[in-house]
Image (cartoon, rainbow, N blue to C red):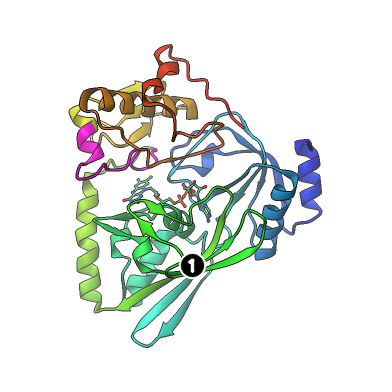
Amino acid sequence: MMSRGEIADALQGLLRCSVERDRPLSGLSTLGVGGWAECYAEPTELEDFLVLRRFSHREGLPFHVVGGGSNVVFADGPIPGIVVSTRRWNAVRWLPREDRVVADVQAGHALASLVAASAKRGLTGLEFALGIPGTVGGAVVGNAGAGGRGVGDSLEEVLSAEPDGTLRRWRTGEFSCSYRRCSLSEPGRLLLSCKIVLGLAPRGEIEENMERFRSARRIQPHGGRSAGCSFKNPDGESAGRLLDRCGCKGMAVGDAVVSDSHANFILNRGRATGGDVLSLLRACRRRVFERTGVLLEPEVRFLGWLYAWDGEPAANMGNEMDEGNETARRV
Ligand SMILES: Cc1cc2nc3c(=O)[nH]c(=O)nc-3n(C[C@H](O)[C@H](O)[C@H](O)COP(=O)(O)OP(=O)(O)OC[C@H]3O[C@@H](n4cnc5c(N)ncnc54)[C@H](O)[C@@H]3O)c2cc1C
């Protein structure tokens, strides 16, 4: 196995962008937790993404992608392998097509900028995404949305770098999206760009739509560091309401605390660690399970942790936390 110095040196010889060693990650997430990436890069060219993907595949290294960091909980301590940020891969082209316009967007483009630019051009279809932070790539991976709509509704085509570093174009019908889920979200797959189809509409109508979503968002906590909703809504129920009914508001582990105004938001009130957040998520999930029998699924994604959340027996949830000792092992 190559040392991290050897990995960085070997990569630097192959890439046009620079490779950083031991790059702190907490500043790259809205929650502000986590350790550091042993190898980190912010490519601006397609070829660099492909080189990184192929290299990690060939060397058997973990490969992680971060967009806007608004839905991730980074692990604490060193995260081995390669962490690639898309934030400097962010161009957009507007392609007119009969009565529509297609936005051909690179993954690192901020979703908020796309929403604003679409409205300015009199294009409808993304108003629901007003106020959702992060990148277009991250939004596709989690089918980000609000009010029953999701980015996947308008998605026509996606270009990805597959785990072996080959390029693949996915067309409508070859992928599917549902509530906070996209079938293209697979470990090791990097979404590079996508085409989003937008309709034409009068500005007033677009503004009205946006106002509706703006008011719905007023119930979310303002300010403070969070990763948005912690858990997905179970069928026919609101995760926030369940958490509230179970008395989760105000629960805390270290500096991670459940918001007083929205029980599905965990806030970092200062020096929370990834372990604090994970422990608190588990405590909330366990409490809801014990009191209601509903097993909540996390909406946030875990990056750099050794074990997956899924598949863990419910009965084991939060055992480490009882001792106040979250010792998550990492890759
Ligand atoms: C205040 C606040 C409000 C929010 N409101 C909403 C909301 O209303 N609706 C909603 O759906 N979400 C909401 N979120 C959550 C979050 O903003 C969305 O999930 C967002 O789409 C994540 O995008 P990102 O670029 O920040 O992804 P990241 O957090 O960077 O990454 C999320 C996951 O996607 C992967 N990923 C990111 N980019 C790529 C790529 N190009 N290729 C492959 N994998 C990739 C990462 O590895 C990670 O697993 C909110 C978050 C905050 C902080």
Q: Nearer the viewer, residue 61 or 138?
A: 61
The residue tagged 1 is: 194
Q: Quadrant of the C terminus?
A: top right
Look at 72% across and 52% down and name the residue there: 18
Q: Nearer the viewer, residue 63 or 68?
A: 63
Disc 1 residue crowd, few under 14, some 14–19, many 20+, Cα 10 Å: many
Q: Quadrant of the N terminus?
A: top right
By secondary structure, the bulk of the magenta-drawn segment is best described as loop
| Residue 236 place in picture, x, y as percent | 19, 45
Look at 48% across and 52% down and name the residue there: 185
Q: Is mark 1 within 8 Å of ligand 1?
A: no
Q: Nearer the viewer, residue 38 or 158?
A: 158
Answer with left or right where residue 157 lies relative to residue 148.
right
| Residue 201 place in picture, x, y as percent | 26, 78
Is any atom of residue 45 visible in this view? no
Look at 66% across and 36% down and name the residue there: 80
Magenta residues?
225-242
Q: Is 236 part of what is drawn in magenta?
A: yes
Residue lying farthest to the bottom in this orientation: 98
State the image quarter where residue 248 is shown: top left
Q: Name the kind of residue labelled 1 in the image.
A: Cys
Answer with left or right where residue 328 lies relative to residue 214.
right
Look at 44% across and 35% down and name the residue there: 310
Answer with left or right where residue 170 lies relative to residue 280.
right
Is any atom of residue 243 visible in this view? yes
Q: Secondary structure at mark 1?
A: strand
Answer with left or right where residue 82 lies relative to residue 107.
right
State the image quarter where residue 247 is shown: top left
Question: Relative to residue 306, is residue 66 depicted above or below?
Answer: below
Q: Nearer the viewer, residue 13 or 62?
A: 62
